[in-house]
Image: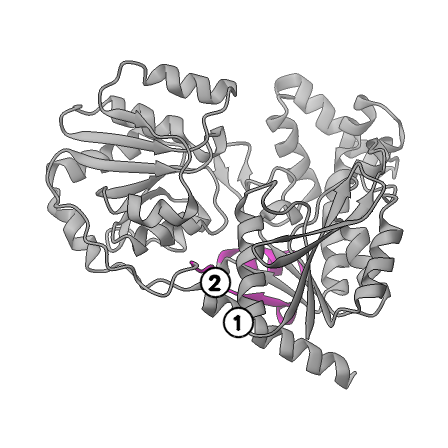
Amino acid sequence: MKVVLCLHHFLPEFVGGTEIYTFNLAKQLMQQNIEVAVVIPNLGVGSTEEYYYEGVRVIKYAENSVEDRAMILGKKKPNGIKLFGELLGKEQPTLVHFHELAPGRGISIFHVGKAYELKIPVVITFHVPFYTCFKGSLIYKEDTKCDGEIKIGKCTACVYQQKGIIGLKGFLFNKVSMGLYSLHINSTDLNSKLGTALGLPYVISKIKKDLVKLSSFAERIVVIAGWYQQVLERNKVPAQKITFIKQGLPVKGNNEIKSIEENLPIRVVYMGRITQLKGLHLLIDAILQLPSSSISLTIYGLETPDPYVLTCKEKTKNVGNIFWRGRIAPSEVISAFSEYHLLCLPSAFEMSPLVIQEAFAAGIPVLASDVYGNAEQIKDGINGWLFRFNDSEDLRNKLKILIDDPSLIAKTKKHLPGVNTFENVANDHLKLYDSIIQNYKAH
């Protein structure tokens, strides 16, 4: 069996969740004697190159397209699509597994279509929710959890609100854009910002149509969260096309790391990107309202010059119980977590955060916002706690309860779930690949 794994970027140049997931999958498949190649676009370069990253073969096909508005909107194919098809023809994979689709000149629906056209079985993993949500957050107008069903009018109004088109202006834009949509006038054909803005219903409609098209191209769509499977089914993706494969850690099993005693101060750790969506400001605000002698916060994350990061740092300036520690190597996360009482994850959205499993592996519970991806892994009061998303006061109240009774932390530790290993993840993929290949041969 030969498997080609496709995504937009790869290690070591880009280090993100999808890249690490794909790398771990490649390594595990190779250990099972599966031939693997990772394929990514060589953006801005007119030649195809190869390199190896820790034994994984990576092919960068030439992609020197000049990205323009039409390409970003999916109206025009990138130049590299022809070379991508030739590459698949040369490599002759048994199966192509797409892990990331990007607009413009990146790996896109056109590439999935090319693999389908070449009669190669296709698998797609949805690591993020952009396949059903323009914003990628599944938060309606920034304050309500959305059920994920694509509804043109509702989604259009939501995106206008995100872009700051609100009040009377928002009402007029919504009225005009939906009026044009009902008259089948697609203003995205106009090469202007106004045309794009008024054509937003068509952009939303394309997300819906592309989802249907992807589900027809793919033998199977893999989701890494059970709740997102329900979202896809609400959007008419056939249930038999969807497979849930739970996230896993690249470890042998539960890490027997002895964590610290449950005494004051409560030591809280945050790890992740420092962005508005991750909600670090909510946690900082909550900590600042509690006695500094009773609680501390350590922050692990890349400190960029982004205004949001600078605002968070300014809030914590000269604060003696909040510490910034920068980035941490993935291999050191579990060991580092064992030095704390609990992990706090205050995000406005999560798909299926691996950091929760890392906390469990380190032997500590998690306090997280009650968004879908967190709530799927955390049972409130059993193996952690949930607070109302985007609600710093509720977060503060939950932390105050733990300060008043630290023994609650010890009680949750008795109910931490076992760690799902990436070996299990790879085995689940192998079973899926085998079933697809057998079924494909039969037809």
- For label 1, the crowd category at 10 Å Cα-Cα, with few meaning under 14, some 14 to 19 and many 20 or more, is some
Q: Quadrant of residue 249?
A: bottom left
- Residue at left 83%, top 70%? 119
Q: Amino acid at mark 2?
A: Lys
Is residue 397 found left or right of 49 in the rendered image? left
In this image, 426 relative to 178: left or right?
Answer: left
Seen from the viewer's position, the closer of residues 367 and 43 is: 43
Location of residue 196 (image quadrant): top right
- Where is residue 198? Give x, y as percent: 78, 28
- Residue 300, x across and y down, in percent: 37, 34
- Which residue: 36% across, 28% down? 282
- Secondary structure found at label 1: helix
Inspect the image, locate mark 1, and give the three-letter code of the amino acid beneath it. Asp
Does the magenta-highlighted stretch encompass residue 130?
Answer: no
Q: Can you say whether 274 is above or below 334 in the image?
A: above
Q: Residue at x 48, y 30 (%)?
A: 275
From the viewer's perspective, is residue 206 above or below residue 125? above
Name the residue beneath numbered marker 1: 428
In the picture, the disc for residue 246 is 2
Which residues fall within the magenta stretch?
Answer: 227-249
Relative to 6, does residue 180 appear above or below in the rendering? above
Mark 1 and mark 2: span between their CA atoms?
Answer: 9 Å
